[in-house]
Amino acid sequence: MSRSIFRLALHWQILAALILGAGAGLLIPDVVTSVDFMGDLFLKGLRMVIVPLIMTSIICGVAGLGGGDGVGRLGGKTLIYYTMSSLLAIVTGLVLVNLTQPGVGVDLGLADQPDRLASSMDRFGDSPWSALVRLLLDLVPSNPIAAMAEGNMLQIIVFALLFGTFITRLPEAQREPLEAFFSSSFAVMMKVTHFILAFAPLGIFALVGRTVARTGLDVFAGLGLYALTVFLGLLIHAGVTLPLLLRSVGQLHPILHAKAMSPALLTAFSTSSSSATLPLTLDSLENRAGVSNRVTSFVAPLGATVNMDGTALYECVAALFIAQAYGVELTILQQGLVVVTALLASIGAAGIPMAGLVMISVILTAVGLPLEGVGLILAVDRVLDMCRTTVNVWSDSCGAAVIARSEGEEGLVSLKS
Ligand code: ASP
């Protein structure tokens, strides 16, 4: 378990930092602004460890699986979980947004902000098919060193998976030193990570304080029916659907599992970034939730990049909200298209703040809605980003636990324990 610079357990410290940060941001914004470098320092520290941590973690994990069959089986289960949980999230959003109809009658005083987003939208192409092709092409790095330098998560994962897999095909004399090297490297990266995590409370205090100091209570002012719908959907998915999955499929205790994951969940909420949270996700899964390194190192890094239930749900609600605001009645077929593209958009979204907002363009284009619609939802995006990122990380952790159970692992937070 991560120790921290104070005595209280890390998750309580993070929670206290969150609350104190919000209070300080409101009451003494100038003071908070003058120490906001602490937030940047913490984020830089997390980013510093991500690439070597993922590389060594995946290579060790995959090499430990013993190559072909093990990787294939785990990969298959992971893929099924990612797809199923994201689809369940999207359908929850779809049903809710059709019930609450938050976009009906919304005033279309559209802002000019979407210009800012337009350039980043271009690269996602203009149809679901081209988005899919782009996703596939983006998987393979033409230069793995460049992928590492740029921190391109998916490409790093693909390269590490191949590297780890083929270590197992080497003769023993070549295999053993490599395995020893990577498992020692992984161990040292975990130690560096623990060291950085000890500063999480200070970093999070500054990050939350800065957000509140900059936006004040406006963060919550724009919260209309739309934001409530997203929030409710996220709550149902995280609080009902995923716990049911944990209980029924994994025979696991949802509350204890959530408690074990709390440092990661609170950090996801504060940073709005699944990728930045990844070191804590790995740590909480292995050292608090009892999931083996073998499963964690495969499921969590991949999940931080491609499995985003919260984002998927949000994409669906946002697209339908925009359609409603424009008075466009989407047919069942078009809503089906929204479901599929929301899934693709959530896979394609990077684990960084506001990535999901940019990806909405993929859906809007697919169903022929004007891209300017994104301007409608900008105001409340920050706070929704915090919530959906938490759900993204929660889903990754549930996936890892359920898959670990299906692999016969003991030591998880079982129902009977
Ligand atoms: N911020 C989210 C994440 O990192 C992605 C999104 O914008 O939906 O998981």
Image (tube, helix red, strand yellow):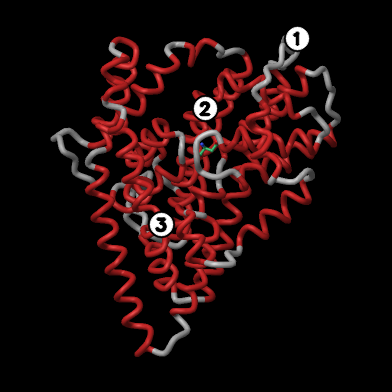
Disc nearer the start of the sequence (1/2): 1
Res 380 → quadrant: top right
**Residue position marked by numbered label 2 in the rendering:** 235
Res 206 → quadrant: top left
Outermost residue toward the left in this view? 7
Residue 160 versus residue 2: which sits nearer the camera? Answer: 160
Determine the residue positioned at 50% across, 33% down: 238
Residue 215 versus residue 256: which sits nearer the camera? Answer: 215
Mark 2 burial class by Cα count in 10 Å: few <14, some 14-19, many 20+? some
Q: Amino acid at mark 2?
A: Leu
**Residue position marked by numbered label 1 in the rendering:** 105
Where does residue 88 sit, x and y in percent of width and height? Answer: 63, 39
- CB within 8 Å, label 1 to label 2: no
Determine the residue positioned at 39% across, 18% down: 212
Q: CA distance from mark 2 to mark 3?
A: 31 Å
Query: SS at mark 3?
Result: helix
Res 5 → quadrant: top left
Q: Which mark is residue 113?
A: none
Q: Look at the picture and state if 224 lies above or below 268.
A: above
**Residue position marked by numbered label 3 in the rendering:** 51
Q: Look at the picture and state if 179 lies above or below 333.
A: below
Q: Look at the picture and state if 99 lies above or below 299.
A: above
- CB within 8 Å, label 1 to label 3: no
Query: SS at mark 1?
Result: loop
Q: Amino acid at mark 1?
A: Gly
Q: CA distance from mark 1 to mark 2?
A: 25 Å
Where does residue 113 sit, x and y in percent of width and height? Answer: 64, 23
